[in-house]
Image (cartoon, rainbow, N blue to C red):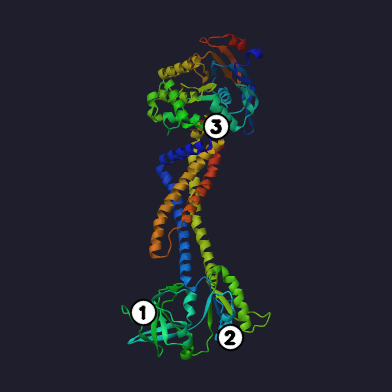
Amino acid sequence: MNFLLEIRENIFISYKAITANKLRSFLATLGIVIGITSVTLMQTAIEGINRAFEKSISAVGADVLYVQKFEWFGKEDWSYYRNRKDITMSQFEYLNRNSQTAVTMCPTVGTPKTLKYGDLSLENVFVIGSTNEYQTTFGSNMEDGRFFTSKESDGGYPVCVIGTEIKNAFFENKDPIGKTIKIGSFSFKIIGVVEKQGSLLGLFSLDNRVIIPIERFFRLFGGKRSLSINIKAGDVKYLDDTKEEVTSIMRKARKVPYGEKDDFGVNQQEAFKTTFESLTSLIKIIGTLITSLSLIVGSVGIANIMFVSVKERTKEIGIRKAIGAKRSTILYQFLIESCTICLLGGFIGIMISFPISLIINAYVLPTAMPLWVIILGLFVSLLFGVMAGFFPAWSASKMDPVESLRYE
Amino acid sequence: MDNNNNGNNILIELKDIIKLYIMGTEELYALKGITSNIIRNDYVAIMGPSGSGKSTLMNIIGCLDTPTSGHYLLNGKNVSEMDDDELAEIRNIEIGFVFQTFNLLARSNALHNVELPLIYRGLPKAERIEKAEEALYSVGLQDRMNHKPNELSGGQRQRVAIARALVNNPSIILADEPTGNLDSKTGEEIMALLEELNRKGNTIIIVTHEEEIAHHAHRVIKIRDGLIESDSVSPKGIMNKEQKEILL
């Protein structure tokens, strides 16, 4: 018998069988509905957590290397890194002169200070000293005004670029450009506002910052500080080459003897991801397992119903066999019936979880159910349909026609 | 008996058919060696009391079951050695069943019930509908096609079953107590229908324990204790030369 014809006929049969026992079919499907709803929602939540994370670390810059005394998420004691030699301006200049692969680089130092404008003041604002290359390294766009020039940078002019939070706190609807604020006890003229950047990992605001020329920073707040050198590789794919080159130049600059370990860290966004993944992967696996469990329970329910259905329709199986149904035909009939029930359950499950994912997207996590989760959900329900239906269908296909015709 | 002359006309050839059931430690011979031939276009009644083995014989002739030993040639094909799926195909093409309890699919209408053997044969939809309608016409149910079994009377249900048996144009129509669940008037109608089908060229085998019903047949085979007790031409039987040769 033609395979497609068989499938179509069997879908028709299962449609009739399902509609003939509406309440039973509904109850049988319920397990799969709940299973698929929870599995798809779990996957959507995981996707959402990933997206939220990606978004929150985007400020770090995927193609930026950070040469620092510290290694991000390093395994050693904090004091071990702290006691390393400082990274100095001369090392930065040596690196900047010799690097062929870096697109741009800038040194940064930072310290928290209190900002004042008239009667208003803001505590614990992070003051960053850097060069004019800072803007190109981080690709930060200006909301208003401009970044400082190399002349202002090298000359250590008393100018500053502020974040949006500072602008909102001091100026509200007024134009901040050209105004003078106090950083600590020193006056700076505002020449630009950096566009809103959000926060890192949802914890540290990146808009509560002020950037001033590094020369002036040293002069006013002290020069004995270790730098962070930020290097832009241009693209993530050049990152490894740049990292290798930077490492070898920095070893020379810091006179690290051959064979000794680096006494500095070359950090990158990757470190966040690795740490994040090692933290979340277990949660993801456990979450997926628990939600899959509900799906398994659902499919056991379907298997149960299918066994009942096969038993109940023994006579029908006998009739079908008597008039020429082969074993495979009967097998397909019941397999397709259980697949139809499960697919229906999967479809309803997605119909439930999709709007919920939109609600999550609006209020909790930046996520919409990705297409692959929908396809996976339907595929998984089909798979569970086959698994739940196989043994009942197999037992139906093996029935003896004489015995089953006699069944009442 | 001259096999060369009759070879083409012999539809069913049973040789030493034995059916043994083993129940725990007990062995039960349902059939103890049945040898018989049935020719094309005959109308045969198989009779016997309950427990005689007539049902077992019918199941074997209908390819629902296989003999423990012996040979069964149907239309020249050795069906006694076929596997489940080959038997299913033989049942589909060669045999049309009519049961005492009608055995229609309750959730399907008359047309779909009649269409079912054609579906299993793999015919395209248009051809299936045409043939199924034709079969329902021939049993006089043209205006009951979309009725479900529970919307039909017993006689009408049996007509649907006969249409289903006919639709694949099988070699044998095998009727197991076809009037057993019908009142005598409706029973007579069904018997008349079978008779008409026989006149049109169908081979009919009917299993019954009622003498009256058996009298419609041309030949009566009586079974007792798993053996053929008697094999005779019924009063209604019209013997032709070939039948005589086989019987005598």
Which residue does the numbered mark 3 point to in the structure image?
A401
Q: Chain of mark 3?
A: A
Q: Chain of mark 1?
A: A
Residue A204 in sight from this viewpoint:
yes
Q: Tag 2 or tag 3, which sits nearer the N-term?
A: 2
Residue B98 in sight from this viewpoint:
no
In depth, the one of A274 and A59 nearer the eye is A59
Identity of the residue drawn at 50% across and 56% down: A292
Amino acid under disc 3: Pro
Quick one: label 3, few (<14), some, or many (20+) residues within 10 Å? many
Mark 3 to mark 2 CA distance (whole Å): 86 Å
The quarter of the image holding the C terminus of chain B is top right
Asked if disc 2 and disc 1 are in contact, CB closer than 8 Å, the reply is no
Position of B203 relative to A132 (above/below): above
Q: Tag 1 or tag 2, which sits nearer the N-term?
A: 2
Q: Could you tell whether A400 is left or right of B126 in the image?
A: right
Q: Tag 3 or tag 1, which sits nearer the N-term?
A: 1
